[in-house]
Image (cartoon, grey):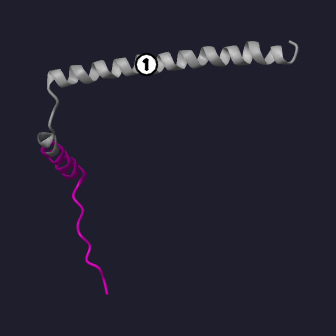
Amino acid sequence: MAVAEVPKASVPQRLMGFYHEVMVEMKRVTWPDVPQVRQLAIGVVILSLFIGGVIAVMDLLFQNLLVRWIPALFGG
């Protein structure tokens, strides 16, 4: 039993179809307003500074542990 082949659209036709589908989806997107963007941007900056601070504290602790305390234990 032979399967009927469906003719494929040409590349330009597929690109145009893809473009139209993207435009339809972009119209459905709910975009944030300026206060939401500002609030989220400030949150990202604060979170980044907090994580940087945690990493800095961990760096100091591990530096003290590995550079000072461990050699002191072995008479260094």
Image coordinates for residue 67, horizontal then vertical, percent: 74, 14
Q: Which segment did they paint magenta?
A: 1-24
Residue 8, quarter of the rendered image: bottom left
Question: Residue at position x 46%, y 21% from top?
Answer: 51
> Is residue 12 depicted above or below 37 in this figure?
below
> Is residue 43 depicted above or below 10 in this figure?
above
Apparent side of residue 70 relative to residue 50 in the rendered image (left or right): right
Residue with the mark numbered 1: 50
Question: Residue at position x 76%, y 15% from top?
Answer: 69
Question: Which image quadrant: the N terminus?
Answer: bottom left
Image coordinates for residue 37, horizontal then vertical, percent: 21, 23
> Is residue 38 depicted above or below 4 in this figure?
above
Question: Residue at position x 17%, y 48% from top?
Answer: 21
Name the residue type under label 1.
Answer: Phe
Question: Which image quadrant: the C terminus?
Answer: top right
Residue 73, quarter of the rendered image: top right
What secondary structure is found at the residue carrying circle 1? helix
Residue 68, quarter of the rendered image: top right
Membership of 3 in magenta stretch: yes
